[in-house]
Image (tube, helix red, strand yellow):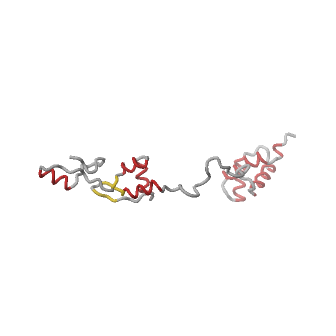
Amino acid sequence: MPELLPDSRNRIYDLAQVEAYLAGAPIPAPPTGDLLTARDIAALLAINLGTVRAYATQGHLSPGTTRYGARLWTRREVHDRRDNAPGQGKGGGRRAGEPQGPRKAHAYENDPRLAIAAQALTTAPADTPKGRIAAELAKLHGHTPRTWKRLLTTAATTHHTDKDDPS
């Protein structure tokens, strides 16, 4: 006898199938309906089964309805998801081959903290580690020592400091 949801952990049959089986009558085919299992959706959208569950959890699909101990979704909802996936359509970003526009020379370009970092490099003794300078700048001006260390590195490569001068 064909099962209603062959992918389910439990063997599930339609009531009409069971009654026909018990009566010894020909068993009708299971109702196909408009409901899809997570496995059906995964095949239809060409995604992993876990992704279907994640979509339902994250709101990209409805939670579905639970019938026969299995979570099911309507075919219409799945087709809407397939045809109108988020992030697609008008205004979806830069097309391949289009120029991206001007780029910054470095991450901290035009950042006023860069001048402070360059000044700190020129006034600190030559053997002072950048980590110590960064920690002091973080105490004085806020932000994290890691941010100041990045600023110091950028300042050392983009600004001419006395330490860089070989004379």
Position of 162 with respect to 5 (left or right) is: right
Residue drawn at x 61%, y 50% is 95
Percent from the top left, x then y, of residue 157? 76, 45
Extreme top residue here?
166
Position of 59 with respect to 29 (left or right) is: right
Foreground of the two, 156 or 64: 64
Residue drawn at x 72%, y 59% is 141
Percent from the top left, x then y, of residue 131? 69, 48
Percent from the top left, x then y, of residue 80? 43, 57
Foreground of the two, 108 or 124: 108
Residue drawn at x 39%, y 47% is 43
Q: Count every numbered label the image shows and give the total.
A: 0
Query: Looking at the rendering, which quadrant does residue 163 occupy?
Result: top right
Position of 61 with respect to 65 (left or right) is: right
Extreme left residue here?
23
Image quarter in which the C terminus is found: top right
Position of 158 with respect to 1 (left or right) is: right
Percent from the top left, x then y, of residue 21? 15, 50
